[in-house]
Amino acid sequence: MRIRSFAASVALASGFFLSGWSAPVKGHALSFGSQEKSDQPKVSAAEQKAADAITAAPDPAAKLKAAAAFVKKYPKSPLRARVAIALADLITDVKDATQKITLAQEYQTIFKEPADQELIVPSLIDGLAEAKRLDEAFAAGAEFLKTNPDSVRVLVKLMLLGTEQAKQRNGNFIPQSLQYGARAIELIEAKKMPAGMDEGSWKYYETNLASWHQSMGILNLVKGDRAEARNRFTKASELAPNDAFNYLMLVDIFDAEYQDLAKRYQAMPSGNAKNTEYPKVVAALDKVIDTLARAIATAEGETRLAPARQQALKDLEVYYKYRHDNSTEGMQQLIDKYKVAKP
């Protein structure tokens, strides 16, 4: 008996995972202060006036035009970095895909330093993806990574975009997405914060490491690499032990492993070899049961996972009865063992 399927797992992923991961907006308002404030760099009155013109401009396009004039006249201004960050944040929030692409590309012609480009490339990727120009989105990211291979921002952005496409059964970008994701995780786990990244942004990528492993699990699951998907979801569950999604995905993988062992066992002739194989089959089934119990316990109260939890309860009862002489005695206690207090 097979309680789950590959299609069911991908459907679960499509309905729950990565509904909108994005790096945090830095929150730099388009106002560059006055010389009276102690934390403001000292600039001339004319320079401050040029910066204030960016703030006063009525829309993003006009602000970029004012910024271009500012950078051209004051290329070494101590306000330049603040202007670049604030405008990148502004473009990130633009909803219209076409406008976002145009603004991001205009920004690239004004702010040409690698640190500036890293701020805007994720927004350009988003805009191109939203416009269904996926090849161009990946090309834009790949071009930037040629000279900035350790940009965690861009590596993660491309991995997540590839994951979204994989969930929609578009596997065209899985190979490169896996490559980008593996590199991003390698850098994060080695605590190699890229030059130019602020501590707050780096903390975001470190804190969400479990989610990056989840994304890699999805990519590998759709690719058909069960072993690597198992590794990724297991790692994610270790980093985020209260996240039921990891266990729900692992159930499918562990059940497939159990089914393989059971079929091989059933095909074996009677004898010592078959007797030796039996404990492995039982252990595999017990792992499915245990993982279902964990998923049910940790998904309690999670509205998005309510249907999956209900199905998991039905699945657990089937396997638990099969393993315990058609009895559910002790099943609830097994679930309760994995319940955790909700924050």
Image (tube, rainbow, N blue to C red):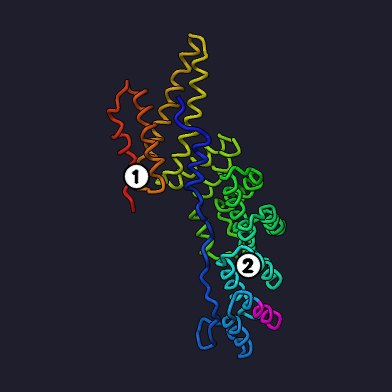
The amino acid sitting under disc 2 is Gln
Q: Residue at x 41, y 43 (%)?
A: 244
- Identify the magenta region: 65-76
- State the predominant SS element of the stretch in magenta: helix
Nearer to me, 124 or 186? 124
Please name the residue that numbered disc 2 is placed on: 99
Residue 217: quarter of image:
top right
Answer whether residue 151 is visible to the viewer in this image: no
Q: Which mark is residue 300?
A: 1
The amino acid sitting under disc 1 is Glu
Residue 120: quarter of image:
bottom right
Answer whether residue 1 is visible to the viewer in this image: yes
Mark closer to the observer (2, 1) = 2
Query: What crowding class fits label 2: few (fewer than 14 Cα within 10 Å), some (14-19), or many (20 or more)?
Result: some
Nearer to me, 141 or 206? 141
| Mark closer to the chain start, 2 or 1 | 2
Please state the horizontal and vertical placement of residue 197, each as a whole percent of the image.
58, 64
Q: Is residue 301 left or right of residue 164?
A: left
Q: Residue at x 52, y 24 (%)?
A: 260
Q: Residue at x 50, y 29 (%)?
A: 256
